[in-house]
Amino acid sequence: LINVSLASTGENTARRLAVEAATANGSLIIASAGNNTGTVPTYPAAYPQVVSVTAVGPTRELAQYASYGAT
């Protein structure tokens, strides 16, 4: 299990290759969707091999600052 608590809106070849290698070797990657308030994909959370998570408030509503979307 690999937890990644960072997010970037730009894709990065080295990061993508690291995600691919880790998941090919059986790792589960959980990554933050980011705190950009919107649906702009962030990486590594946007890679299809990664489980993307976001933030919620005390009543489980989407946090005001949270990123969200299809990824």
Image (cartoon, rainbow, N blue to C red):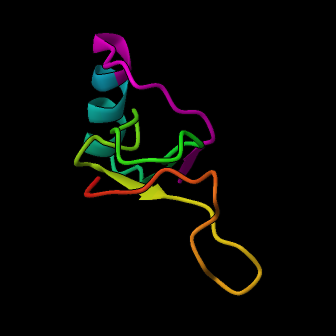
Residue 51: x %, y % from top left: 39, 57
Q: Residue furthest bottom?
A: 59
Main SS category, magenta section: loop
- In the figure, residue 70 lies in which quadrant? bottom left
- In the figure, residue 60 lies in which quadrant? bottom right
The residue at 34%/33% (across/down) is: 19
Q: Nearer the viewer, residue 28 or 33?
A: 33
The residue at 77%/81% (across/down) is: 58
Left/right placement of residue 10 relative to residue 8 reads left
Q: Nearer the viewer, residue 29 or 62?
A: 62
The residue at 35%/47% (across/down) is: 39
Left/right placement of residue 6 relative to residue 14 reads right
Residue 5 lies in the magenta-colored region:
yes
Left/right placement of residue 27 relative to residue 13 reads right
Residue 33 lies in the magenta-colored region:
no
The residue at 62%/62% (across/down) is: 55
Label total for image: 0
Residue 59: x %, y % from top left: 71, 87
Tell me which segment is drawn in magenta. Answer: 1-15
Q: Nearer the viewer, residue 5 or 10?
A: 10
* Above/below status of 68 relative to 15: below
Residue 24: x %, y % from top left: 25, 42
- In the figure, residue 45 lies in which quadrant? top left
Residue 71: x %, y % from top left: 29, 52
Q: Residue furthest right?
A: 58
* Above/below status of 61 relative to 47: below
